[in-house]
């Protein structure tokens, strides 16, 4: 990038993302008028050569892209080493209004939450596209993996060939909870996105050594709040029953269409009313 240092380039990316989220483009599209879809973004950076990317081939599936594989789909004519690539990852925290509304619900998601899933994710897609445009204006190659035409979900694994949550984990932004949500410094109630950039950006230190480290159930066995919040029993002490969760989401879609007159889906009940809703919960103090 045309910056004095990698840190200056990272600062520019953070400023550009923050400015976008402070603009009218960050809109929940509520019927009563403009309202922010999300709070201000939290960003982190990772190396395209981080060894964690290869482990996802085993833990997620062989279909999961490394950054180099995603980049090659966007620039098939280029020969690029993974060490030349950096990942930009961000967290978009749900607003207090959205979290408050969903916290009150027990069987179906709140109106604001569903709009954040549908229209809020459109904001997230527009942020991806905006950053891609601005970075390319600097003459730097960049792709947004989830916007590539090759991006897809696998029906058998209920996974995708590029996981934004896993990218955020590599970029030092959080660890996974029992429900598979990412617990971050701004909480588990959030959306996330990522880019692969052909540039040298400073790596964000990971302040954890285990992918479950911030979850109270896994680090100390002292929490089952998200299990209690699930309306269909898709969560248990061992984790997340993805097929049961998906079946519930399929059932929610007609309710949303009938109640609010737009096509959508969502739940997020396990992401609110829990200790990790707004941040990383402190571990209980051990008795002397």
Image: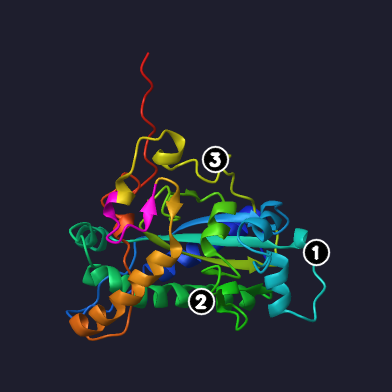
* First to last magenta residue range: 228-236
Please name the residue shown 25% across and 63% down the image: 98
Residue 179's tag is none
The residue that disc 2 covers is 130
Crowd tier of the residue under label 1, counting other residues whose Cα lies within 10 Å: few below 14, some 14–19, many 20 or above: few
Q: Quadrant of residue 137?
A: bottom right
Q: Is residue 78 left or right of residue 193?
A: right
Check contact, mark 2 vs mark 1: CB within 8 A: no
Q: Is residue 29 left or right of residue 104?
A: right
Mark 2 vs 1, N-terminal side: 1
Q: Is residue 80 above or below residue 241?
A: below
Q: Depth check: give the residue in front, 78 or 267.
A: 267
User: Which percent across, then down, holds residue 127?
Assistant: 47, 73
The residue that disc 1 covers is 81
Q: Depth check: give the residue in front, 281 or 139.
A: 281
Toward the right, the furthest residue is 79
- Cα distance between the residues tagged 1 and 3: 27 Å
Classify mark 2: helix, strand or loop. Answer: helix
Q: Which quadrant holds the N terminus?
A: bottom right
Mark 1 vs 3, N-terminal side: 1
């Amino acid at each position: 990038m045309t910056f004095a240092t990698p840190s200056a380039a990272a600062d520019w990316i953070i400023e550009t993302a923050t400015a976008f989220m402070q603009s009218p483009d960050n809109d929940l599209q509520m019927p009563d008028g403009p309202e922010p879809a999300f709070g201000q973004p939290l960003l982190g950076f990772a190396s395209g050569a981080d060894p964690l990317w290869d482990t996802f081939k085993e833990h997620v599936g062989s279909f999961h892209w490394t950054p180099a594989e995603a980049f090659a789909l966007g620039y098939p004519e280029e020969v690029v080493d993974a060490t030349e690539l950096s990942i930009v990852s961000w967290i978009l925290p749900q607003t207090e209004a959205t979290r408050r509304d969903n916290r009150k619900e027990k069987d179906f998601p709140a109106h604001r939450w569903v709009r954040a899933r549908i229209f809020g994710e459109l904001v997230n897609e527009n942020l991806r596209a905006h950053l891609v445009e601005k970075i390319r204006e600097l003459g730097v190659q960049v792709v947004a993996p989830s916007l590539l035409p090759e991006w897809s979900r696998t029906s058998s694994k209920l996974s995708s060939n590029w996981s934004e949550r896993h990218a955020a984990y590599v970029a030092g932004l959080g660890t996974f909870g029992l429900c598979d949500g990412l617990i971050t410094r701004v909480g588990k109630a959030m959306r996330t996105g990522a880019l692969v950039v052909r540039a040298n950006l400073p790596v964000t230190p990971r302040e954890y050594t285990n992918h479950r480290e911030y979850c109270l159930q896994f680090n100390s066995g002292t929490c089952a709040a998200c299990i209690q919040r699930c309306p269909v029993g898709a969560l248990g002490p061992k984790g997340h029953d993805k097929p049961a969760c998906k079946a519930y989401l399929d059932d929610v879609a007609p309710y949303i269409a009938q109640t609010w007159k737009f096509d959508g889906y969502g739940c997020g009940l396990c992401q609110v009313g829990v200790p990790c809703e707004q941040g990383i919960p402190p571990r209980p103090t051990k008795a002397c």
